[in-house]
Structures are given as C-alpha cells and as structure tokens.
Image (spheres, grey):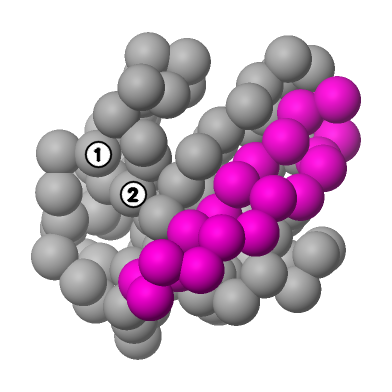
Amino acid sequence: MPTVTFTDAQGEQRTVEAAAGDSVMETAVRNGVPGIVAECGGSLSCATCHVFVAEEDLGELPEMEEMEDEMLYGTSEERQENSRLSCQLRLAEDTDLHVTTPETQV
Ligand code: FES
C-alpha cells in the first residue's frame, strides 16, 4: 500500500496510507491534510495543489507534462526545482513519497 508523508511549512509531519492509482492530491483531500487546496479538483487548472517533493523521491515520479510545467509558473509560493502539482502524481503500489506543502496555496 502506498504512503504519503506530508510536511507542512511549519515542519509538522503526517503520514497517510493511500490507494494505488490515486493522486497525492486526492490522498490529501480524502484524509483532511491541510495545505492542499485543489480548487479545480484535479483538472490541472488551478495550481493550488502545489507541493515540494523530497529530493530522494523525485526519481520515482512520472515525467512532468508540458501543461503541468506551465501551471507551475502560476503557483502562489514560488516554484522550486522540486515543485510538482500533486494532482498529477499518481501513486503506485509501492510508492512511499515525502512532500512538503507550501506556506500558502492562494
Ligand atoms: Fe488544480 Fe491540481 S488540483 S491543478
């Protein structure tokens, strides 16, 4: 079963179990994890599901599509090298992902 550990901007951590095939955003929303707004519900049009992925986990993720790349220029907190939109991160059965949520999404 995949797991996702969310660390907020204050350093507070929360690990939740996920379902394979779900996105990191869906996992956050389902578990009431604060820091992910996801205004558009995952249709890649809001950029309020921005996360910073732990460096050691970046290689586990699918390549970024052009649309996600463009949307990342519209995030509230400035984009970094490890920025991704969590609605685009589908979890595999053996994924164990660590992400940090930004100070603000809007
Ligand atoms: Fe809107 Fe990810 S939930 S872009």
Left or right, residue 98 beside residue 92: left
Residue 29 appears in view: yes
- Give residue 84's position: percent from left, percent from top: 35, 44
Q: Quadrant of residue 37?
A: bottom right
Which residue type does callout 2 highlight? Phe
Query: Compared with residue 85, is residue 98 higher up or lower down, i.e. above or below?
Result: above
**Mark earlier in primary sequence (1, 2):** 2
Membership of 102 in magenta stretch: no
Q: Is residue 49 visible from the viewing direction of this image?
A: no
Tell me the distance, in whole angstroms, between the alpha carbons under discs 1 and 2.
Answer: 5 Å
User: Quarter holding the C terminus?
Assistant: bottom left
The residue labelled by disc 2 is 52
Judged left or right of residue 48, residue 3 is right
**73 and 104: which is toward the camera:** 104
Question: Closer to the camera, 13 or 73?
Answer: 13
Q: Residue at x 28, y 55 (%)?
A: 71
Please give the range of residues in magenta.
Answer: 1-21
Q: Is residue 18 magenta?
A: yes
Q: Quadrant of residue 79?
A: bottom left
Q: Pointer 1 and pointer 2: residues touching (CB < 8 Å)?
A: yes
In x, y percent, where is residue 103? 32, 78
Which quadrant of the figure contains the N terminus? top right
Q: Is residue 57 above or below residue 15?
A: above
| Residue underneath mark 1 | 82
**Residue at the image point whose x is 72% and y is 66% from the top:** 29
Label 2 element class: strand
2 up-or-down from 80: above or below:
above
